[in-house]
Structures are given as C-alpha cells and as structure tokens.
Amino acid sequence: IWAGILAGNGPVFCAGADLKAVASGNANLGTKRGGFGGFVTLERTKPIIAAVEGPAVAGGCELVLACDMVVASPTASFGLPEVKRSLVAMAGGTTRLPKRLPPNIAMEMALTGDAIDGSRAYHHGLVNILCEPGEAIEVAVKLAERVNANAPLAVRATRKAIREGGVVSD
C-alpha cells in the first residue's frame, strides 16, 4: 500500500465517541500507540486521504484532521461539538483545526460547536477536492492514484518534510 483512504460506511462518516461510555469511564477510545481511534497520533509514512460523505463531527472531525488530504461532497459536514456537551476536543481538534482553516473560522467552530458544510470547508481549504454526493470514495481513489504515480520514497520524504515544516502537525 502506497496511500490509504479513510472512509465511513454509511450516511455518516463518523460521529465520534459514545458519550455515555465516556461519561461512565468505560470508553476505550483508542490505542496507546495511535491515540483516538488508533489513528490520530499514529506515526506513519504513507499519505492517508479522508473520503467524507455526511457528518464528520467530534472524534470524526479529529480523524479527518489527522489525514493528509480530504475529499468530500457538499453533504459532508465538519465540526467539534464537544463544547455543547461540556467537553473539550482533545484528540487533536483544537490544535489541528487552526492549522487547516483560518484561525477565526477554527475558533468559531470550536467555541460555538457548530459544524460547517463541505462547500464551506472546501472554500477555506480544509477539503482538497469537492465532489458530487456519493462519489467521495471514487474521487479519493483517483487522488490516491495521482499520488501513487510518483516515486514512493519521494512521496514519503516529501510528506515528512511538509509535516516537519510546521504546516500540519501529526
């Protein structure tokens, strides 16, 4: 595998953790090595593309923010609603969002808990490619093929250089 695609299986990309389980203290939200979802802090060298249809909120948004590129339809939505539930988005949302969006848009999302749709996310640069509804995975595969047309070691080294350059944090 030279590139991966992270996609939901249904009308929702991911709505995050089960808040009842979190409140009870019985939630297993991730792994020691990978953090939330076993993914958000996972060290990796290969690019991952998020293919988003429907809501990617709370932990779902944090999974998207941990990806290198995003393909989404206008029906997608991205948000950190934790503040509406007396919680803090601590799986990378509060640190990654202002690196992927203008800081004032990130602040609006984080402090209001309101989501933005795929079109607004594309307009502000969170989404690389805005596709037709139902086509996110297909378009993400085409993007992965464009990446895979290049030398894999050069792709990995370039990804690492961008990550270490402070543009996007792991």
Image (cartoon, rainbow, N blue to C red):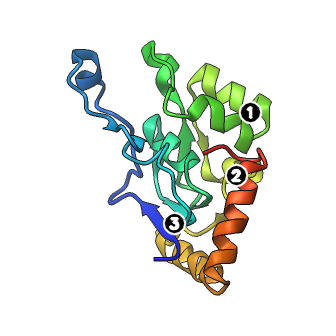
Badge number at residue 133: 3
Among numbered discs 3 and 2, the one appearing first in the sequence: 3
Give the quadrant of residue 22: top left
In the picture, the quarter occupied by the N terminus is: bottom left
Among numbered discs 2 and 1, the one appearing first in the sequence: 1
Q: Secondary structure at mark 3?
A: loop
User: From mark 3 to mark 1, how far is it between C-alphas?
Assistant: 24 Å
Q: Nearer the viewer, residue 128 or 118?
A: 128
Q: Tag 2: residue type?
A: Arg
Cβ–Cβ under 8 Å for marks 2 and 1 = no
In the picture, the quarter occupied by the C terminus is: top right
Q: Secondary structure at mark 2?
A: helix
Is residue 66 visible to the viewer in this orientation of the structure?
yes
Per the image, the residue denoted by label 1 is: 105
Q: Which percent across, then down, holds residue 104?
A: 78, 29
* Residue 66 position (above or below residue 5): above
Q: Tag 1: residue type?
A: Ile
Q: Which percent across, then down, holds residue 133?
A: 51, 66
Give the quadrant of residue 128: bottom right
Badge number at residue 68: none
Badge number at residue 163: 2
Q: Tag 3: residue type?
A: Pro
User: From mark 3 to mark 2, how far is it between C-alphas?
Assistant: 30 Å
Give the quadrant of residue 115: top right
